[in-house]
Amino acid sequence: MTVLDANDVRRIALSLPETVEKEAWSMPTFRVAGKMFVTVPDDQTSFAVRCPKYDRTELIASEPEKFWVPPHEASSAWVRVRLGALEDIAELYDILVDSWKQAAPGRLLETFVAPGPDRGPKD
């Protein structure tokens, strides 16, 4: 089993079209067209992504070992993901792409094509 870390989050996020990394709140954040779609908190054992509240409740209920929301983020449309609970790099990629798609402008969504079956960018 591959152990995923914050470097994997960074590598995949930056592989997505027009993504930039910007420090905010003393942590790395990743943005497309100025909109944040992922953050990596200080301990780097998890990351936060955009997630509509109605989907978030279902995610947390179905996989509480993987997804959660800290009390101070309860009113937001974000969810935290534990890196150690992810199955593989493809699952991490899918989660990051889903969040990116929620922030990306339509012109990028129209032309975005995900990589092949392994779904992750190459090193």
Image (spheres, grey):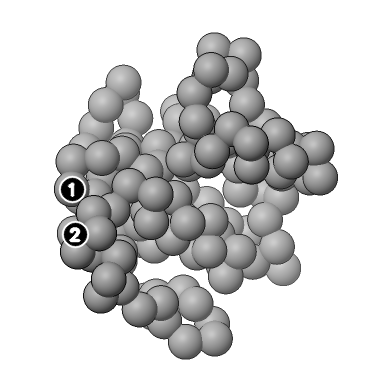
- Identify which residue, 50 or 119, lies in the foreground: 50
Comes first in the chain, label 2 or label 1: 2
Horizontal arrangement in the rendering, residue 96 relative to residue 54 (left or right): left
- Residue at the far bottom: name it: 116
Dot 1 amino acid type? Ala
Asked which quadrant contains residue 30, the reply is top left
Q: Quadrant of the N terminus?
A: bottom right
Q: x%, y% of residue 59?
A: 71, 43
Q: Is residue 8 above or below residue 41?
A: below
| Label pair 2/1, CB-CB below 8 angstroms | yes
Residue at screen point 80% across, 37% down: 61
**Element type at marker 1?**
loop
Asked which quadrant contains residue 19, the reply is bottom left
Q: Is residue 59 above or below residue 71?
A: below
Dot 2 amino acid type? Glu
Residue named by callout 1: 33
Residue named by callout 2: 18
Horizontal arrangement in the rendering, residue 32 relative to residue 74 (left or right): left
Asked which quadrant contains residue 42, the reply is top left
- Residue at the far top: name it: 72
Q: x%, y% of residue 15?
A: 30, 66
Q: Residues within 10 Å of mark 2 (few under 14, many from 20)?
A: few
